[in-house]
Amino acid sequence: MGDHNESSLPNENKNANDKTNVWIAVILTIIINGLVTVLFFMDGFSREVEGFDLTILPMLNAIFNSFTTVFLFTALFFILRKNIKMHRRFIYAAFTSTAFFLITYVTYHYLAESTEYGGSGAMAAIYYFILITHIILAIVIVPLAVLSFMRGIKYQVRKHRKIARWTMPLWLYVSITGVLVYIMISPYY
């Protein structure tokens, strides 16, 4: 897992079968996006959880999204300098903070009713534009991130680069807009 360039990789890694990567991406996409969709249409538990303020969970979502953004920018910084070892470490960190985000997101939406945005006029238009693009791209980023990750850890460099060119900016957009959505809706919790 050290610093590798494409020419120093074993042939079996460069020519690895990509079908497994695609299947893993498809299965995780169905599970994650399916769970979020079910929670979207399901009424929240909507009872007080004794001694626990549920509104801390959306704040944690924003914090985890902030960490993901920092980790992704740092991973990009290192890969642009061809430091694969550090790039990988920050991608692992981005996946970890994203996993924590997913846990707090699912927990909140299982336990609580959705919060409606209370603004109006131009701010409401901006909020809903950011929210809708965030949701659509969050759905798209799941398979892209998983497939980029799988190809990267298997040193399928050409395939990884091809998809990572799309994954990185989209994932950054999703993580940044996740924080913006929280900031805009937080007064209404």
Image: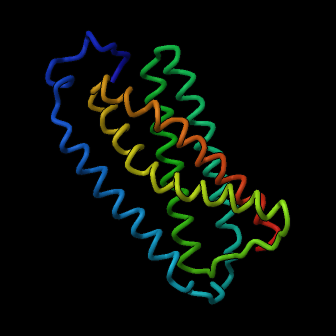
Query: Colour mode?
Result: rainbow
Q: Is residue 151 left or right of residue 187?
A: left
Q: Is residue 68 left or right of residue 189?
A: left
Decide which of 153, 143 is in the foreground and name it: 143
Q: Is residue 188 left or right of residue 138?
A: right
Seen as rendered, the residue at the extreme top is: 7
Q: Position of residue 8 (x, y in %)?
A: 26, 11
Question: From what the image shows, is residue 31 above or below residue 39?
Answer: above
Question: From what the image shows, is residue 94 above or below residue 11?
Answer: below
Q: Position of residue 169 (x, y in %)?
A: 55, 36
Quarter-of-image position of residue 85: top left
Q: How many marks?
A: 0
Q: Is residue 167 left or right of residue 58?
A: left
Q: Quadrant of the N terminus?
A: top left
Question: From what the image shows, is residue 8 above or below residue 185?
Answer: above
Quarter-of-image position of residue 189: bottom right
Seen as rendered, the residue at the extreme bottom is: 47
Q: Position of residue 175 (x, y in %)?
A: 60, 47
Which residue is found at the position 48% from the left and 54% from the top? 99
Quarter-of-image position of residue 3: top left
Which residue is found at the position 58% from the left and 40% from the top? 172
Which residue is found at the position 26% from the left and 50% from the top? 24
Q: Position of residue 21 (x, y in %)?
A: 25, 43
Decide which of 71, 182 is in the foreground and name it: 182
Which residue is found at the position 57% from the left and 84% from the top? 44
